[in-house]
Amino acid sequence: MDADTLTSISQQLASLADDMRRTGVPTDGTHVHQDGLSMRLIYTRQDLVDTFNDFQDRAVHSIDALDRGGRPAHAESQSKSQPAALARGVRFRVVYDPSVFERGDLTLAMLDSVGQGEEARVSTNVSTRLLIRDREEFIIHASGHSTASHLAIQLTSPVLADFINDSFTKVWETALQVSNRKFESGTLLEDDEIQILRLLAAGQKDESVARALGVSVRTVQRKIHALQRSFGAASRFQLGAISARHLIVGREAGD
C-alpha cells in the first residue's frame, strides 16, 4: 500500500463523513458507532487542536503523523502535549511535506521537537494530514477532499487500522531522514545528494556524475534510486523537477 492508497482511503472516509452528516450525525462532538467503526466529525479548529492534544496525552506507545502543513499563521508550532508524551517514552514519527519548511517558526519548532526525541522525515508523498495514536485511533483531515464544513474525522476501526498503519509505514520507509545537523545546516539533503540532483537537472549521465563525485557508477545509481524512492519520482527527470520545485536544492542552485 502506498501514499495514493492512503489518499483514496482519506477521500472515502471524507465521503462517508459527508453522508453521515447529511443523515443527521451529531455536530456536538458525539461519537457515532456503526459496524465496528467509531467516528466523530470535528468542525472547529479549537476542537481539532484539543483532540490532537488529547491523543498525545492518552498515547501509551506511539504517535505517527503525516504533516502537510497548512496551519494558520497564529497556530501553535508544536503541540503543547508533545513534550510530556516524549518525556514518558512515547515514540513520535512524523513525515513532513517540504512546504512545511517554508515557515521559519515551524522549522524551529520541528528542530526543537527533534531535539526532544521526535523522529522526523521528509517526503513529497505526503498527501494529507494524519495523526495515529497507538496504531488504533486516527485523525484524518478532510481538507482538500471534502466540501463539507467539518475539518477532520476522528475514528477508531480495527478494520481500517491495518490499512492506515501500513500506508503510513510505506511513506515513512521511503522518506528522507531529518536530523538536527541537517536542520542546522539549512538543508534536508547531504552534499553529495545535492550535487547529484544538480547534475541530473543539467542532463548529466551516470558516468559523468560518478566522475564529478569521484565515486563509482554503481554508487551513483544506488543514490539516484534511493532519491527517487524518497521523492516518489518515476524517472530521473522527474526527480530533478521535484527537487527544484520543492526543496532547498533549487534555491541553492541559483546561488
Image (cartoon, rainbow, N blue to C red):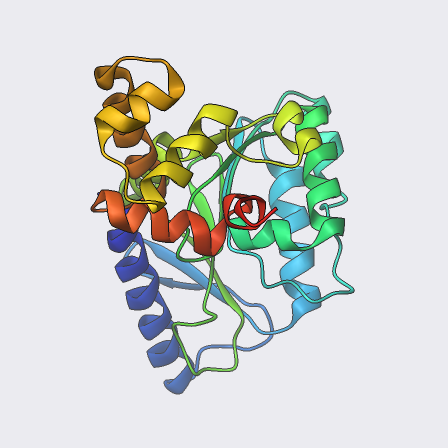
Q: Is residue 111 left or right of residue 98?
A: right
At horizontal 60% and vertical 45% (from top left) the residue drawn is: 55
Give the x, y percent position of residue 227: 34, 34
At horizontal 26% and vertical 54% (from top left) the residue drawn is: 4
Front residue of 214/81: it is: 214
Q: Is residue 145 above or below residue 198?
A: below
Q: Is residue 18 above or below residue 196?
A: below
Give the x, y percent position of residue 242: 38, 51
Name the image quarter holding residue 109.
Answer: top right
At horizontal 51% and vertical 55% (from top left) the residue drawn is: 68
Q: Is residue 107 left or right of residue 151?
A: right
Q: Is residue 148 left or right of residue 60?
A: left
Q: Is residue 169 visible?
A: no
Give the x, y percent position of residue 80: 77, 44
Front residue of 235/59: it is: 235
Where's the N terminus, which quadrant? top left
Q: Is residue 42 visible?
A: yes
Give the x, y percent position of residue 122: 48, 40
Number of marks in the rendered image: 0
